[in-house]
Image (spheres, rainbow, N blue to C red):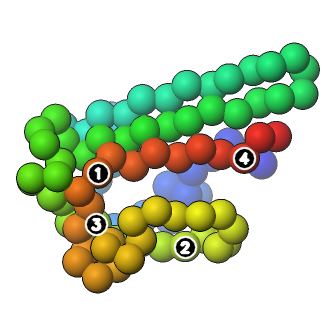
Amino acid sequence: MTGKRPRDFGIVPGIFKPGELNAISDVPGVRVGQVTLLEGSDVRTGVTAVLPHAGNVYQDRVPAGLAVENGFGKLTGVSQLQELGELETLVVYFPLVW
């Protein structure tokens, strides 16, 4: 793994320029939280949460889409996301323990 992003190789996705950090946290109003848990020398896990804006996400839903990478795991709320195209909760990601 090179640690580089597609833009570093001249691949420019989308039509918008990236923010200062080229990260989701550059988007105004988006809040991101992350915790990594270490246990001994073998267990590494954690959680990342993304809140699309500071208001009530249930009352002020945001447009959203879905792309399934490998289909491994469970996804709650996918039916509503596919049918309505809206997100009404924060997004929480728990990676597998490695």
Residue 79 vertical position relative to residue 56 in the rendered view, above or below: below
Residue marked by disc 4: 96
Residue farthest bottom in this picture: 83
**Which numbered disc, 4 or 1, marks the residue that appears first in the sequence?**
1
Mark 2–mark 4 CB contact (< 8 Å)? no
Amino acid at circle 2: Val
Q: Residues within 10 Å of mark 1 (few under 14, many from 20)?
A: some
Q: Nearer the viewer, mark 2 or mark 4?
A: 4
Q: Quadrant of residue 45?
A: top right
Closer to the eye: label 3 or 1: 1
Q: Earlier in the sequence, mark 4 or mark 3?
A: 3
Residue under the image location 50 percent in, 37 percent down: 48
Q: Nearer the viewer, residue 10 or 94?
A: 94
Q: Residue at x 77, y 48 (%)?
A: 1
Mark 4 to mark 1 CA distance (whole Å): 22 Å
Question: Which numbered marker is on residue 68?
Answer: 2
- Decide: marks 4, 3 in contact (CB < 8 A)? no
Check residue 89 in the rendering and tell me which mark sits there, or answer none.
Answer: 1
Residue 8 appearing in the image: no
Q: Which residue is mark 3?
A: 64
The image shows residue 44, relative to residue 81, as above or below, that is: above
Q: How far is mark 2 from mark 1, CA to CA?
A: 18 Å
The amino acid pointed to by label 4 is Leu
Q: Label 4 neighbourhood size at 10 Å, few (<14), some (14-19), many (20+)?
A: few
Give the structural element (helix, strand or loop) at label 2. loop
- Dot 3 or dot 1: first in sequence order is 3
Identify which residue is drawn at 37% across, 34% down. Answer: 32
Q: Quadrant of residue 21?
A: top left
Q: From this view, report whether residue 76 is shown above or below residue 93.
A: below
Classed neighbour count for the residue bearing mark 2: other residues with Cα under 10 Å, few (<14), some (14–19), many (≥20): few
